[in-house]
């Protein structure tokens, strides 16, 4: 089994030795950093090549959200932690329920801070974790694995496909095994790491960029953005309260005092405040107009103008 694993790893680009950094242990600090920065430039083009597959995944995620489904990330180690990082930002940034985007990591919560040896090697744990959150066919499951061979992720994707879920594989190797377990394969292959097999680096950056795209584009498609303003942000701390005021001021051109006054009337809901200011409607009428437009602020404003003409 160990011989097979060594042979398999030898076929993966993310595990190959980088010919440009074989002297890196002899270099001074500035030159080490130059090598790292140069290698990182491989990442954006690798992600760009995968834009059609990323777009296909976004369309499936949006469709799932619209019918009450969820986006579920699953991975091990760095891949799992990147999924968590993306998922936990969605509720405060876009005002969505906390269970709309879920991240699972092999080994559970303890694995966020320290390695849980062996957890990623058990495909049954992937299935069991999905069963615990009551996976349904409405959900989209994204399996994240830099190497593309993580058994935990493979087990989860297989179970998800059995249920009829849309499945997405995110790996940094074109020969990724998880690509065979998914409906959509996103494979930004950015080449060997500056330290052989240290996939928290280029591979991790590529995965982070893709995950950013999946949620950001999906939330835009759901009407969570007005122009390029995050109008559904939750004002849960002092910084975000300030941000909501600034968003309202940017969107409407009103003063700080006027933005604060209107926000105080609608529980610091930036989208609702903007709708009230730009339409002249009171809070209840503005809320109804937004509901009729499925939360799309531009559409709600246009419908209001059309009704007034």
Image (cartoon, grey):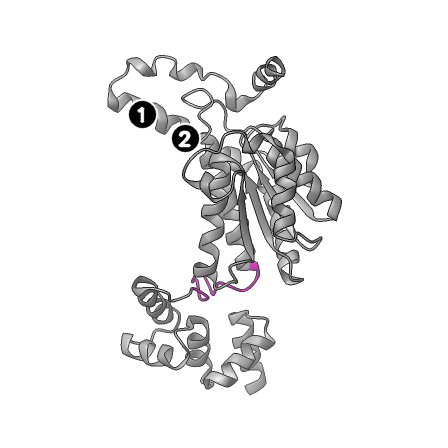
The residue drawn where x is 29% and y is 76% is 255
* Mark 2, secondary structure of its residue: helix
The answer to which quarter of the image holds residue 299 is bottom right
Dominant SS of magenta comes to: loop
Instruction: Residue 136 in the image: state x and y as whole percent.
Output: 69, 54
The quadrant of the picture occupied by the C terminus is: bottom right
Q: CA distance from mark 1 to mark 2?
A: 10 Å
* Mark 1, secondary structure of its residue: helix
Residue picked out by circle 2 = 40
In the figure, 186 relative to 277: above or below?
above
Which numbered disc flags the more N-terminal residue, 1 or 2?
1
The span shown in magenta is: 221-233
The quadrant of the picture occupied by the N terminus is: top right
Q: Which mark is residue 84?
A: none
Quick check: is 167 in the magenta stretch? Answer: no
Is residue 188 visible in the rendered structure shown here? no
Instruction: Residue 118 in the image: state x and y as whole percent.
Output: 54, 29
Instruction: Residue 292 in the image: state x and y as whole percent.
Output: 60, 77
Within-10-Å neighbours for mark 1: few <14, some 14–19, many 20+: few
Please tell me which residue lies in front, 253 or 205.
205
Within-10-Å neighbours for mark 2: few <14, some 14–19, many 20+: some
How many circles with numbers are drawn on the protein? 2
Q: Is residue 256 left or right of residue 223?
A: left
The residue drawn where x is 62% and y is 59% is 65
Q: Which mark is residue 34?
A: 1
Is residue 266 visible in the rendered structure shown here? yes
Quick check: is 232 in the magenta stretch? Answer: yes
In the figure, 81 relative to 59: above or below?
above
In the figure, 84 relative to 199: above or below?
below
Q: Is residue 288 left or right of residue 110?
A: right
The residue drawn where x is 66% and y is 33% is 179
Instruction: Residue 302 in the image: state x and y as whole percent.
Output: 55, 76
């Amino acid at each position: 089994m160990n011989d097979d694993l060594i042979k398999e790893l030898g076929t993966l680009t993310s595990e190959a030795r980088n010919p440009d950094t074989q002297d890196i242990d002899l270099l001074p600090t500035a030159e080490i950093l130059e090598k790292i920065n140069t290698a990182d430039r491989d990442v954006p083009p690798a992600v760009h090549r995968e834009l059609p597959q990323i777009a296909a995944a976004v369309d499936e995620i949006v469709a799932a959200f619209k019918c009450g489904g969820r986006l579920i990330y699953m991975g091990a180690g760095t891949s799992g932690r990147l999924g968590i990082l993306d998922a936990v930002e969605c509720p405060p940034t876009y005002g969505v329920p906390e269970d709309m985007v879920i991240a699972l990591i092999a080994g559970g919560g303890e694995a966020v801070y320290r390695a849980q040896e062996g957890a990623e090697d058990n495909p049954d744990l992937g299935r069991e974790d999905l069963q615990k959150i009551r996976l349904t066919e409405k959900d989209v499951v994204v399996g994240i694995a830099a190497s593309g061979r993580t058994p935990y992720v493979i087990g989860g994707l297989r179970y998800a496909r059995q249920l009829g879920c849309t499945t997405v594989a995110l790996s940094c190797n074109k020969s990724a095994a998880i690509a065979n377990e998914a409906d959509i394969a996103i494979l930004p292959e950015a080449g060997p790491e500056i330290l052989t097999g240290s996939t928290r680096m280029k591979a991790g950056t590529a995965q982070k960029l893709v995950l950013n795209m999946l949620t950001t584009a999906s939330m835009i498609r759901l009407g969570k953005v007005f122009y390029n303003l995050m109008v559904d942000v939750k004002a849960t701390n002092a910084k975000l309260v300030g941000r909501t005021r600034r968003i309202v001021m940017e969107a409407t051109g009103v003063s700080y005092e006027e933005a604060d006054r209107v926000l105080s009337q609608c529980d610091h809901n930036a989208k609702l405040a903007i709708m009230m200011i730009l339409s002249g409607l009171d809070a209840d009428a503005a809320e109804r107009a937004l509901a009729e437009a499925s939360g799309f602020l531009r559409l709600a404003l246009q419908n209001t103008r059309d009704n007034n003409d």
